[in-house]
Amino acid sequence: MESEITALSETRKRLEIRIPAEQVDVTIARTALRHQRRAKVPGFRPGKVPLGVVRQRFKQDILHDVANDLVPQAVEEALRAQELIPIDTPDVRDVSIDEGQPLTFHALFEVMPSISDIDYDALTLRRPSVTPDDDAKERTLEQLRLRASTLEPVTDRSIETGDILTVDMKRHRISGPQDTSEQQAEDLRKGVFVEIGATANPPGFDAELIGLSIGESKSFEISYPAEHDQADLAGTVIAYEIEVKENHVRKLPDIDDEFARSVGDFDTVDILKEKIEADLKREAEIEKQRGVRKDLMTQLAARVTVEAPEGLVEREISRRLEQIVTQLAQQNVDPRTANIDWNSLRDEQRAPALETVRGTMVLDEVVRRESLTISEEDLEREIKVYAERLEQTPAAVRAKLDRDNGIDALSGGLRREKAIDFLLSHATIVDA
């Protein structure tokens, strides 16, 4: 086998391979015999088809199988000989194969560039100033009151701001971009909850319902702005028909000792407030540490002057977009209908993704240079944390990681955390 590596850039490589005709023909013969055993051809019993007929009738299938046998082996052998580790599976192109001819192809792949000369000593990191504002404790108490609130029925007055309604709703599109019969189909929903004054309500919606009473109905139209969050509603005019079925008002509990006991293991409201204050201080400290880590990664990334592998950058961009999709789903927003320009958002993620990749490259170099390792106990401890988060057994999580080849990724993440701890322990940290 002949192979040649061409450097297209610091990270991108082109591998040319030529497998001798003799090796190709031997593999063709072996593969043809395998096909002969299972070949089905009219006029012949299974397994008794003459080899010449098999090689002629199933030539393309045989050549396809031969290429699948020889190409991966040749790529692996050539990369091992050159001591190259591709970031992703090499992209094999232009495979040429035939009887009596050498098999030729080329493969494109990326490798990590060398940053063995990078300096990560004498780091000075900034710790941001983070303190809970004066109203943070009160806002937390109000959030707890909201969670502990109850809904009381309203029957003696009309609808006001702050009321929580149960309605039957019909709506259909009157006009808007890309009008179709499907878009104009009537949407009927029963038992819909509507909070009058909620920020999620479309402009003008609340005003149409204020003043109505239980059992009353109203028809009206709402014009959605072109920049509305839901892409399927942006720039449309929607006709609504609303029937009010129930009306409730939210009753907030008084902030007293009984309230404190209802939200947790607190005997008095003063103890609850002390706990809230302690939690806010702890969150502020966590935010400070997060700021130090962010400054560390920014400074590490700035020290990388070589090209970052595009495959890693694209992978990081995709990870960030997946996080955004998950966050939208948690907010009950369908990413497919959200008014988001995903192409523009992908472009916006490139710069922070590139910084993350560069910073991670330095962390991996720190792991290599400082010989940082993790123990089996470290790994088991992290698996246990995952298991508790997923409400599964550690054994089940370990089994899934083994099936998905996730142990290496988890181990790599733990080694990078050790690299961060190492750098922080040797850095000078100043208050910003």
Image (spheres, helix red, strand yellow):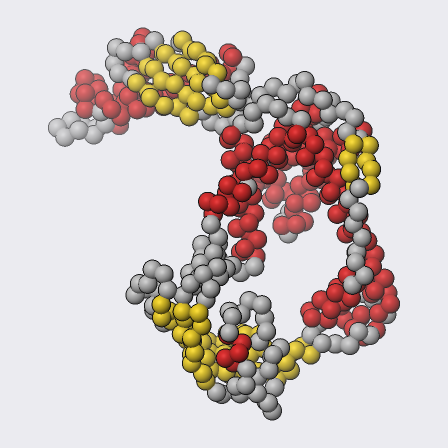
In the rendered image, the vertical position of residue 4 relative to residue 426, given as above or below:
above
Name the image quarter holding residue 92.
top left
Name the image quarter holding residue 350.
top right
Image quarter (top left, top right, bottom left or bottom right) of the C terminus = top right
In the rendered image, the vertical position of residue 66 relative to residue 247, given as above or below:
above
Q: Residue furthest bottom?
A: 156
Q: Residue at x 62, y 77 (%)?
A: 162
The image position of residue 122, as x and y in percent, is 79, 26
In the image, taking residue 375 as reference, residue 217 lies left or right, namely left
The image position of residue 238, as x and y in percent, is 41, 71
- Asked if residue 376 shows in the view, the reply is no
Q: Residue at x 84, y 69 (%)?
A: 269
- Asked if residue 93 shows in the view, the reply is yes
Q: Nearer the viewer, residue 109 or 301?
A: 301
In the image, taking residue 154 as reference, residue 15 lies left or right, namely left
In the rendered image, the vertical position of residue 115 relative to residue 295, given as above or below:
above
The image position of residue 148, as x and y in percent, is 71, 72
In the rendered image, the vertical position of residue 68 relative to residue 412, given as above or below:
above
Q: How many numbered markers are drawn?
A: 0
Name the image quarter holding residue 52.
top left
Q: Nearer the viewer, residue 113 or 238?
A: 238
The image position of residue 17, as x and y in percent, is 39, 14
In the image, taking residue 359 as reference, residue 332 lies left or right, namely left
Image quarter (top left, top right, bottom left or bottom right) of the N terminus = top left
Q: Nearer the viewer, residue 384 or 17?
A: 17
Q: Residue at x 69, y 70 (%)?
A: 146
Q: Nearer the viewer, residue 272 or 430?
A: 430
Q: Residue at x 79, y 58 (%)?
A: 133
